[in-house]
Amino acid sequence: LHCVAAYIDNIIEGKCHIIFMREKRRPSKAYLTLEVVDDQVVQAKGFHNRDIMPDEALIIDRYNAYLRTRKAAA
């Protein structure tokens, strides 16, 4: 059972979204799993629940900035 299954009720109720971030050069392989709540990444994990690396944190920061911009434009 994938650990994301623990979030199924929150996903169904619209309390969060789960996004699988993938590398463009290897789209079939999940890179990071992100939990998004209120247009903000609140949790990010790698394969086997590993913590994210500093370079991955920068990508997530950029994605959060994009989400804030999109929310402000709505």
Image (cartoon, rainbow, N blue to C red):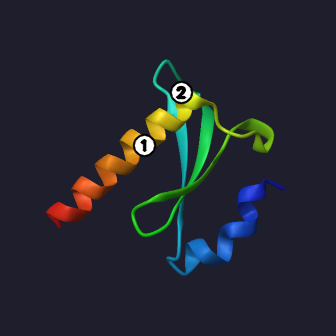
Residue density around tag 2, few if under 14, some if 14–19, many if 20 or more, within 10 Å? few
How far across and how far down the image is residue 9, in percent?
A: 66, 78
How far across and how far down the image is residue 48, in percent?
A: 80, 40
Please give the residue where the numbered disc 2 appears in the rendered image. Answer: 55
The amino acid type, in three-letter code, at marker 1 is Asp
Please give the residue where the numbered disc 1 appears in the rendered image. Answer: 61
Describe the element under mark 1 as helix, strand or loop. helix
- Left or right of 54, for residue 68: left
Query: Separation of disc 2 and disc 1 at Cα?
Result: 10 Å
First-in-chain label (2 vs 1): 2
- Left or right of 16, for residue 39: left
The amino acid type, in three-letter code, at marker 2 is Asp
Q: Quadrant of residue 70?
A: bottom left
Would you say the residues marked 2 and 1 are in contact, meaning their CB atoms lie under 8 Å apart?
A: no
Q: Is residue 52 above or below residue 64?
A: above
Q: Residue at x 74, y 63 (%)?
A: 5
Looking at this view, name the residue that lies furthest to the front: 54
Q: Nearer the viewer, residue 55 or 1?
A: 55
Residue density around tag 1, few if under 14, some if 14–19, many if 20 or more, within 10 Å? some
How far across and how far down the image is residue 33, in percent?
A: 61, 46
